[in-house]
Structures are given as C-alpha cells and as structure tokens.
Amino acid sequence: MRLLTPLHQKVSPPKSLEQITCKMGTNGDPSYTISSLNSGMTSAISTAPPKPLDLKLTKELEELLKSHGIFETTAEMTHRMEILSKLDLLVKNWVRDLSIQKNMPPSVAELVMCI
C-alpha cells in the first residue's frame, strides 16, 4: 500500500496551509522553501529553515519509507489529484445549486465557485 508522496515532489496543498517545496541540489542535498499561502487557524510552530540534523533525519526517513514501498508513484499522485479536483468541482456545483434552490440570488451563489 502506498500512502505518502516524497518531499521532492511538489504537491499543491489546500490554500489554508503553508507550501513547502523541496529542490534537490547538484550535490544531492535538499533545499527547502516555506511560503505561507494563508495564515490559517493557527500560526506555524516554526518558519525557520531545517537544521542539518533535520535534513539528515528526513533523508533517513525517506529511505526507510521507500524501502517499505510507502511512497506513491507520480502516476498515482496525478490520478489522486485529478480525482480530488473533480470531487472539489462536484461539491462546489452542488453547494451552488442548493443555494439557488434555497432562494439565494444566482449571482451570490456563483461566488461559491470562486472559493
């Protein structure tokens, strides 16, 4: 069973979370960038870049997870993201239609599609 995506693969998080991107350097060491998309409900525990020990432990954890076949393939990740995108659109359309049925002005109900 594969559940996780490696950190070096960029995945679009929900807008209420911080985006963490990781690029592998020419020497094989990762370089992390943290950018806040929205402050969300609570603030971050830390926005400091990872320490060398953090990077070492992350690499060891990734190797362990890879050896157990935990990471999803790029094809699996793409399929999951496509399904989630379709589900998101389905829910937004349902909320818009229900809002119109409950006498909300269509122009206001269309705002649901922008959320």
Image (cartoon, grey):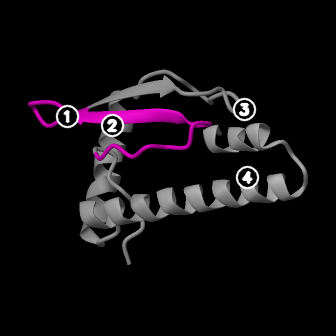
The residue wearing badge 2 is: 55
Q: Residues within 10 Å of mark 3 (few under 14, many from 20)?
A: few
Query: Which of the two residues, 84 or 68, is positioned nearer the viewer here?
Result: 84
Res. 73 image quadrant: bottom left
Task: Single out the mark in the foreground, 3 or 2.
Answer: 3
The residue wearing badge 3 is: 42
The residue wearing badge 4 is: 96
Q: Which residues are magenta?
A: 9-30
Task: Single out the mark in the foreground, 3 or 4.
Answer: 4
Q: Looking at the image, do the residues carrying marks 4 and 2 touch, with CB atoms under 8 Å apart?
A: no
Q: Residues within 10 Å of mark 2 (few under 14, many from 20)?
A: some
For mark 3, give the secondary structure.
loop
Q: Residue at x 42, y 67 (%)?
A: 3
Q: Is residue 43 above or below residue 14?
A: above
Task: Single out the mark in the foreground, 1 or 3.
Answer: 3
What type is the residue that disc 1 sits on?
A: Asp
Q: Looking at the image, do the residues carrying marks 1 and 2 touch, with CB atoms under 8 Å apart?
A: yes
**Label located before the other in sequence (1 or 2):** 1
**Label located before the other in sequence (1 or 3):** 1
For mark 2, give the secondary structure.
helix
**Label located before the other in sequence (1 or 4):** 1
